[in-house]
Amino acid sequence: MSDTPSAISRRQLLQGAGAMLLLSVSKAGFAASSQVIAVRVWPSSTYTRVTLESNRQLRYRQFALSNPERVVVDLEGVHLNAVLKGLDNLIRSDDPFIKSARVGQFDPKTVRLVFELKQNVTPHLFALAPVAEFKERTVMDLYPANTNNDQDPLLALLEDYNNGQLEKKVPAEGPKPGRAGRDRPIVIMLDPGHGGEDPGAIGKHHTREKDVVLQIARRLRTLIERQPNMKAYMTRNEDVFIPLKVRVAKAQKQRADLFVSIHADAFTDRSARGSSVFALSTKGATSTAAKYLARTQNAADLIGGVSKSGDRYLDHTMFDMVQSLTINDSLKFGKEVLGHLGRINKLHKNRVDQAGFAVLKAPDIPSILVETAFISNVAEERRLRTAVFQQQVAESILAGIKAYFYEHGALARRG
């Protein structure tokens, strides 16, 4: 969960594993000219994102050059500064797409950024309005130009999303073949919250939600894969930003039987503590806290950054007719997980809460959002950082999954 803007300092929000350069700019400097105040580079196997943060919206022009392959971005009305000069130092050797970068003052009013590439890419540039602690952002996403990965549909889903075609390309789910756990493996989609440009909540000792929940999800995936009748997928397995509805669409594409979104809660009052489980509500939130949490979680796309084509898709209500049976199953599933979490940690609430979480809106997949603990609570932040507690959380969620399917007759009880 993202903390309130007042509770997160700018340095905390932008601190990340992705490379970053930050410049302090005075108010007088803002008034004088457009300035790039931060540059961040987020490489991943799916795509690489370059973010230029500025005090004003940047005017830019992008084109390609060959021999060698390069992407060029001209920034108009900008002067070269220390942040831009350090761009090449942010390019990692393991970046799948960018080989190197260089920056120069092309003419008195234009700064030119040149990215030399390791492979052919499709650049996707867009601007983001200020949100939370971010000011104006210009984003360049570099996607592979040629790919064919039938095992993981994420790249194709992102392409459809950016083109505003996700709604058309992901039809509502139909009946799954055979019985889960009997005729075929139970398919579980694990969703580590946040990622990339969006760090999620940040604890007092700088623990980032996106890192902790990814570690827990990886542990849970390992446990699930050891089960003879289960299969796990992840919406992300690295520090990359994935839009909320692409996460849902990936679960649909993989024909998941369950969807588990994993988070670490935060609140302005650091005394708040305990684990929680949430399900979808189409009739309004069941508590003020659930409503607040859903609002902040649903803002993840604004913080992580989606293009205008993605925003047009977000304006549609793809999942208006969520089946009441699916929500009832989600509540049953959530109750089982909550019960097992209560054995390893204090519960913030003794029942499954509900609100309009965008990431839980798959129409035919029981879906829950697990707030593992309050990362804003110093004691729970300390526990979240430990391998022991992360493993306990993963084991508790697995136990809840098994208990849910025991009740549905998909698994035989042992012992």
Image: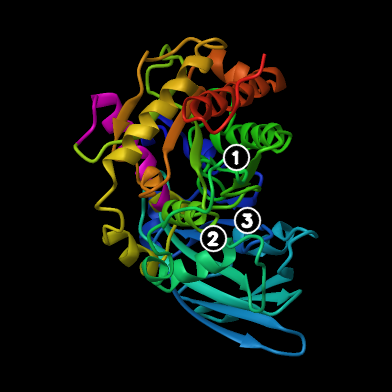
- Tell which tag, 3 or 1, sits nearer the viewer: 1
Location of mark 1 (residue): 182
Residue 83, compared with residue 393, is above or below; it is: below
The amino acid marked with disc number 3 is Trp
Is 103 covered by the magenta stretch? Answer: no
Which region of the structure is painted magenta? 284-301
Vertical placement of residue 18 versus 309, above or below: above
Q: Pointer 1 and pointer 2: residues touching (CB < 8 Å)? A: no
Residue drawn 71% across and 22% down? 387
Q: Position of residue 244 (x, y in %)?
A: 43, 51
Left or right, 390 with reference to 293: right
Bin the neighbour count of mark 2 within 10 Å (Cα to Cα): few under 14, some 14-19, many 20 and up.
many
Disc 3 and disc 2: Cα gap in Å? 8 Å
Relative to 96, does residue 331 appear above or below in the rendering?
Answer: above
Q: Name the residue under label 3.
A: 42
Query: How far separated are the C-alphas under marks 1 and 2?
Result: 47 Å
Marks 3 and 2: CB-CB under 8 Å? yes
Q: Any mark on residue 134, and which?
A: none
Camera-nearest label, 3 or 2: 3
Is residue 105 in view?
no
Q: Residues within 10 Å of mark 3 (few under 14, many from 20)?
A: many
Secondary structure state at the residue bearing disc 1 = loop
Query: Distance from label 3 to label 1 (Cα)?
Result: 41 Å
